[in-house]
Amino acid sequence: MRVSVVGGGTITDEQAARAEAVGRELAARGHTVVCGGRGGTMAAVCRGANAEGGTTIGILPGEDRDAANEFVDVAIATGLGHARNALVPLNGDAVIALAGGVGTLSEIGFASIYDRPVIGLETHDVSDLGIDLEPVDTPAEAVDAVEAALEP
């Protein structure tokens, strides 16, 4: 399946390690990573997936496919700026949300609009907004939850 991973463009070393572990776990289980294709969480999750031989798709805000991080296999230029945040969760079967700012929050919102399961690992508390986000504690639990949410 395709799993969208959303999170901040500027992150700490600890957050990068967590995102990379998510990417590794997804790829080890045969899933494709979809992300925003740039730096921070996006580069870390792609680096992890790449290390396990996985496939990564980056949905970029600008018009230049070469702006993708070096670990993106398929770069999609949109020219939409922040509006591309709607396309990241739309192109995944589920979403794993990591730490981030308002861009991440918007992607969580779009995931809810598109009825994608959202798994949260150190991310926003959106329980007061009526968004069904399942919190987990580890990258492996995040992927377990995605797989369980999409079982027939």
Image (tube, rainbow, N blue to C red):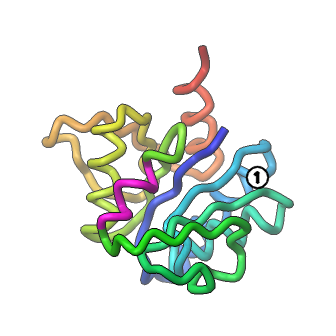
Residue 150 percent coordinates (x, y): 56, 26
Figure check: 108 above or below 49 = above
Q: Is residue 82 left or right of residue 67?
A: left
Residue 11 drawn in magenta: no
Give the residue drawn at x 43%, y 34%.
117
Q: In this view, does 46 lie to the left or right of 61?
A: right
| Residue sticking out furthest to the top | 152
Prevalent SS, magenta region:
helix
Residue 137 percent coordinates (x, y): 50, 49
Q: In this view, does 143 lie to the left or right of 53?
A: left
Q: Which of 81 and 147 is in front in this view?
A: 81
Snapshot quadrant of residue 113 = top left
Query: What amino acid type should be assigned to the residue bearing mark 1?
Result: Ala
Figure check: 124 above or below 72 = above
Tell me where the magenta segment starts and ends, as one range: 83-89
Q: Is residue 71 left or right of residue 41?
A: right
Residue 87 drawn in magenta: yes
Few, some or many residues within 10 Å of mark 1 (<14, 14–19, 20+): many
- Name the residue beneath numbered marker 1: 27
Q: In which quarter of the image is the N terminus?
A: top right
Give the residue drawn at x 36%, y 61%.
85
